[in-house]
Amino acid sequence: MKQQGFLVKEPGFAALAAQRLRKVQAAGAKKVGVILDGGLAAPRIGREIAPPLPGAIEWLISAKEAGYDVFIEVGERPPAIVSAWLKKHCPGLQDAVHICPKRPAVHVMLDPTAIRFDGRNYPDLATLESAIPWWVTTD
């Protein structure tokens, strides 16, 4: 199904998302995900992982202490490199989180580029136009 040259999600998208959420909830654990670039680390600098954003490591520690299962979405980065980054900035944490190449099935995902969406509330174009890119500071 195509519309104006863009691929449109199949009608069952919301049902699949709800099914995925039920699966996460049935597991019983509190699960939270966060992207690496722009979520935990400053924006990507070439192939290197940038330093942690202020408060990122503290947040990871507090989430683990609160009993959350933490998943870090890393995209194409090799897990060993991400693990070494975690070990450098907070030794021991690399063994306490899950490093994932794809978006994990979690209760909440921290992603500075996202707009909350449930399959029914498409943002209008004015909202998209006024969105502030994640790399732009607003201080």
Image (tube, rainbow, N blue to C red):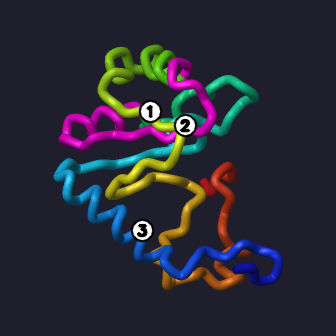
Query: Vertically, is 9 above or below 25?
Result: below
Mark 2, secondary structure of its residue: loop
Q: Amino acid at mark 1?
A: Ile
Q: Quadrant of residue 89?
A: top left
Query: Vertically, is 47 above or below 20?
Result: above
Question: How many angstroms separate mark 2 from mark 1 (CA)?
Answer: 7 Å
| Residue at the image point whose x is 40% and y is 47% from the top | 33
Q: Amino acid at mark 3?
A: Ala
Residue 61 on the magenta segment: yes
- Pick the residue in front: 14 or 30: 14
Q: Are marks 2 and 1 in contact (CB under 8 Å)?
A: yes
The residue tagged 1 is 99
Q: Amino acid at mark 2?
A: Val
Mark 3, secondary structure of its residue: helix
Range shown magenta: 57-81
The residue tagged 3 is 17
The residue tagged 2 is 74
Question: How many angstroms separate mark 2 from mark 3 (CA)?
Answer: 21 Å
- Pick the residue in front: 13 or 41: 13
